[in-house]
Amino acid sequence: MFDTIKKWAYLSLVNLLIVSILGVILRYKGAFYLPVPDYKNLLHAHSHFAFSGWVTTILFTCFVYLIPFRKTYEYQFWLNQVASFGMLVSFTIQGYGAVSIAFSALSVVFSYWFAFAYWRDIRTLTFPPLVKVCLQLALIFLVISSAGPFMLAFGKGDMVLYNNAIYFYLHFQYNGWFTFGAMALFFWAAPRFHIYLAPNFSKVFVILMGIACVPAYCLSMLWAHPPGWIYTTGGAAGLIQLAALAFLILAVPVKKNLHLLWVLASVAFIIKIVLQVLTLVTALGRFAYGFRPVVIGYLHLVVLGFVSFLILGFLIMNKLVKGDKIGLGIFITGVIANEVILMVQCVMAYCWGSGTPTAAYWLLGAGVVMMSGIGRLLIMQRSDVYQSKKHL
């Protein structure tokens, strides 16, 4: 079973490399002329494959690692890969069309099947209460997020409903499935690596985050100037998340040496929560939703800075992936550079009304650095994967 999980982790890293390659092509098209593929189609392929091919695949792999292996999960893994690569190819070629929608639907089928099977299995297993709650919440929000794509069918011709449907999907993926999935892995691994968390503070953190997740969707609706109760609900959810963040900080021992990737993930998580609350400030909220680098910076902050760093740390600590300091250092440098460049763009645009014209070239450079780091990390896994295959 361990060798199978290692192989899946390796394939997940291959998918992350593909995501980074698509990102570099997008950045190249933003800096120089490249007629094909179509930018919007490639952007859809990049985002869908990042969600399904990387984050969902690696969370699935890590979740299965926590429980006794069943053959069902192997079928599910390959079903998700078919759906992910189907979306990658079809979105690149046709954008939203019959084929890409069909593969998207197949991805939803996978999520329902996995959520049902995994929920059934963990119900009979002994887990620390916080781990089980986080696992269950992650599965619940994974299923809920699938309502977003279905809502798109009703949003044709209505831009507000259409965008809110997209934000619905993004919110329950980012703040539900991704966040609680990553937290489940953190709470499971922490005591195994002698990181002892204050149990009461940890419990309050999870409770508050669980309570805030659904109403926090209102924060994603502020762009459309909604009724006052939306602002009130979103504001309350944002304050609850801030309180949860405070309890998490209190729960983690200050003097304990955490893995560098987990430290960086923690910083990204703190920034994520603060940024969400700042959208309640009317001027900042309108700017955030109206200026694309803000949205791109936030999405990358969550997927790369928080989720990917935390999961890579989990994989390395559990010896599912060989930690390569050079590869990780290059990747971390690229992620930080990407966020800093986007932040500078945002500050300049907010203060002076325009960003820097050279940002596209710097972002391309940051993308190449990230891609190089992932590539180096993958190369260092090859010997381990080869040895694993000999024992399969």
Image: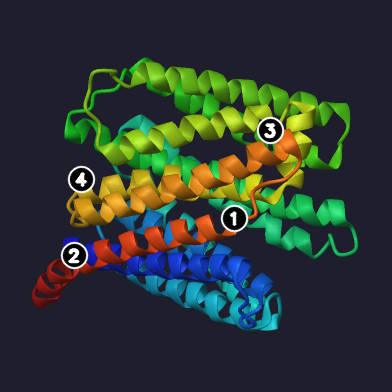
Q: Earlier in the sequence, mark 4 or mark 1?
A: 4
Give, as a three-letter code, the residue at label 3.
Answer: Pro
Q: Which residue is mark 1?
A: 358
Q: Is residue 138 above or below residue 44?
A: above
Give, as a three-letter code, the residue at label 2.
Answer: Met
Q: Is residue 135 above or below residue 36?
A: above
Tell which tag, 1 or 2, sits nearer the viewer.
Answer: 1
Q: Earlier in the sequence, mark 1 or mark 3?
A: 3
Circle 4: element type: helix
Give, as a three-letter code, the residue at label 1.
Answer: Thr
Circle 3: element type: helix
Q: Nearer the viewer, residue 1 or 16?
A: 16
Give, as a three-letter code, the residue at label 4.
Answer: Met
Circle 1: element type: loop
Q: Which residue is mark 4?
A: 317
Is any part of residue 268 visible from this angle?
yes
- Spatial CA distance of label 4 from label 2 is 16 Å
